[in-house]
Amino acid sequence: MAVEILLPKIGFSMQEGQIAEWLAKDGDQVTEGQPLFSLEADKSTNEVESPATGTLKIVASTGETLEVGTVLGYIE
């Protein structure tokens, strides 16, 4: 079963964020806890870790501004 990668809420007032960079490529094998992408929000940049181990399937592009909770990809 695939695990959804969601845009996390970092900070109390965060409503949206932007993927600055994917640190793994579509189709890569990733491990739980590995940095997956850089998230820009509220004038800060944070690395977001993988929620699971498996194959990464990216559905959101860098530079897009997305709402908290949006599906960014899957780990199968």
Image: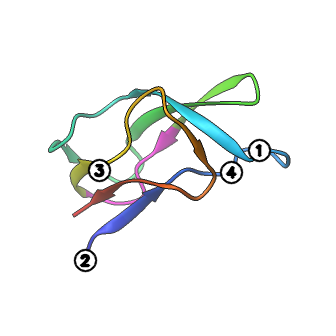
Mark 2 Cα-neighbour bin, 10 Å: few <14, some 14–19, many ≥20: few
Count the numbered circles shown.
4
Counting residues from the start of the chain, the first of labels 3 and 4 encountered is: 4
Q: Secondary structure at mark 1?
A: loop
Nearest the viewer among 35 and 18 is 18
Q: CA distance from mark 2 to mark 1?
A: 29 Å
Q: Secondary structure at mark 3?
A: loop
The image quadrant where one finds the C terminus is: bottom left
Counting residues from the start of the chain, the first of labels 2 and 1 encountered is: 2
**Residues at circles 4 and 1 in contact by the CB criterion of under 8 Å:** yes
Residue type at mark 2? Met
Residue 35 x %, y %: 42, 37
Q: CA distance from mark 3 to mark 4?
A: 22 Å
Residue 43 x %, y %: 74, 22
Q: Residue at x 17, y 42 (%)?
A: 28
| Quarter location, residue 60 | top left
What span is colored magenta in the figure? 48-53
- Indicate which label's residue lies in the foreground, 3 or 2: 2
Residue 31 is labelled as 3
Residue type at mark 1? Met
Counting residues from the start of the chain, the first of labels 4 and 1 encountered is: 4
**Residues at circles 2 and 1 in contact by the CB criterion of under 8 Å:** no
Q: CA distance from mark 3 to mark 1?
A: 27 Å
Q: Secondary structure at mark 4?
A: loop
Is residue 35 in the magenta section? Answer: no
Residue type at mark 3? Thr
The colour scheme used here is rainbow
Counting residues from the start of the chain, the first of labels 3 and 2 encountered is: 2
In the picture of the structure, the residue carrying the numbered disc 1 is 14
